[in-house]
Image (spheres, helix red, strand yellow):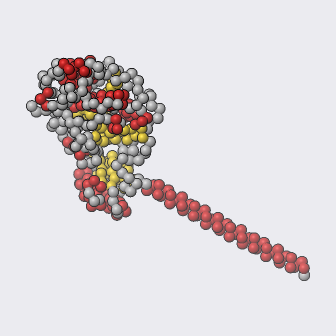
Amino acid sequence: MKAPKIGGYRLPGKAPANANKYNADKVEKLPSKVDLRKFMTAVEEQVGNSCVANALAGAYEYLTKRELEDDTDVSRLFVYYNARYLDDMHQEDAGSYMETAIKGLKEYGACSESNWPNEDDLILEEPNSDAYSEAESFKIIDSKHLETDLTVWKSALAEGYPIAFALNTFDSFDDACNNKGRVPMPKKSDKTRETHGWHAMLAVGYSDPDKVFIVRNSWGEEWGDKGYCYIPYDYVIHDEYNGHDSWIIKAIDESNYGEEVWDKDESSSFTDEDSTVIEDFYLLTEDPDGFIEDLEALLEEYTESEEGYYFDYEVSEEDEDGNCEISMNDFYLDTEDEDSFLEALEELCIEYAVDDEEYDYQVAGYEDEEEDEEEEDEEEEEEEEDEEEEEDDEEEEEDDEEEEEESSSKKRK
């Protein structure tokens, strides 16, 4: 059977009116980074359209690992079957609703994968009585719905709760396999995936320096960065791309998961001190495709491999003059000839910009270097002025001494 276009996540249309809302008021100051991965179990590969069950199973396994120090795999097909059963859809592999899957965890609980394995031929089968008996002791007690808001999401993660959510994915989503796990912003040329459109995943951290969420997928450890990917804030917190159906689950009333997963490091996870980082880039042009193609060629010329550079861009709609604005969300390279590259980049911008004032960018660190140079120049000027003043003072003292000697000589005469 061909998988539905929306994949394993079924759109609810809107969040339920009676949903218990998460309040982002417990963390006074958010850390620059949060990463829950060290408490996650191994990334599994889903069978069928079970992405919702995989996301929630990952969240449940995280809770049991932190609370009970138990890394037993939860049966995703048990969660998947019960979610479909509650919606009377258990006779087909057509995905599930997030809210119903959570309801199933509250009503039926979760059994171990050894009791109900992750096998294709079990997708449509009702789990056995042993699975239900075991799951009776492992129910979640609470769930909270999250608004699609950056601060709300970061607060939940900083408290130590992974977020099950849904995202509309595109062909470029698989770029995570070639870009150290990074997923680019969707482009106008992207088409919704045939096998995975709306897709459920689990957010397990964030990085302010890189402006990305750390996300656990369910396509095995060979995909992305060992099964994880890094999705831009602007992609996840987006009215059109986000399913607005995001949840945290709880196995106990109160927990203290937070500060152990905080990181105060302000540096990027993808660049180092030798990387050339371009910031605040924009260019207005009538030929955005030509510019991007030539920029890619330029980057290939100045780096040793495709892993030596990365840029993620967005192109605006055409204005009344037929021009588009290109903006960069992330742009860096590792090159041994930074000066020549920057000269070539400047020439490329001049070539494609509609005029000299319709492009701009900053090179990270250059402002600091210029400020340091200005400070050094000021210090040198001050030193020179001090030396000149000292010389003037010495000359005045010598003149005074000579005058005194002359005066004394006249008196003796």
Residue plotted at (47% across, 58% down): 370
The answer to whether any part of residue 243 appears in the image is no
Q: Quadrant of residue 403?
A: bottom right
**Is 365 on the left or on the right of 295, as rendered?**
right
* Left or right for 251, reference 43: right
Q: Quadrant of residue 125?
A: top left
- Residue 132 in percent (x, y) is at 22, 19
Q: Is 106 in front, or is 330?
A: 106
In the depicted view, which residue is nearer to us: 186 or 20? Answer: 20
What residue is drawn where x is 79% and y is 76%?
Answer: 402
Q: Nearer the viewer, residue 183 or 35?
A: 35
Determine whether 276 is above or below 15 in the image: below
Q: Looking at the image, can residue 335 be seen?
A: yes
Instruction: Check the image and name the residue furthest to the bottom.
Output: 413
How many marks can you see? Answer: 0
Percent x, y of residue 63: 33, 29
Give residue 43's position: percent from left, percent from top: 25, 37
Quarter that holds the N terminus = top left
Quarter of the rendering containing residue 353: bottom left
* Quarter of the image that includes the C terminus: bottom right
Relative to 6, say whether 308 is above or below. below
Q: Residue furthest left?
A: 1
Residue 89's x, y, as percent?
Answer: 16, 21
Q: Residue at x 26, y 40 (%)?
A: 227
In this rendering, position of residue 91 left or right of residue 318: left
Residue found at x 30% / y 51%: 310
* Most foreground residue, 336 or 219: 219
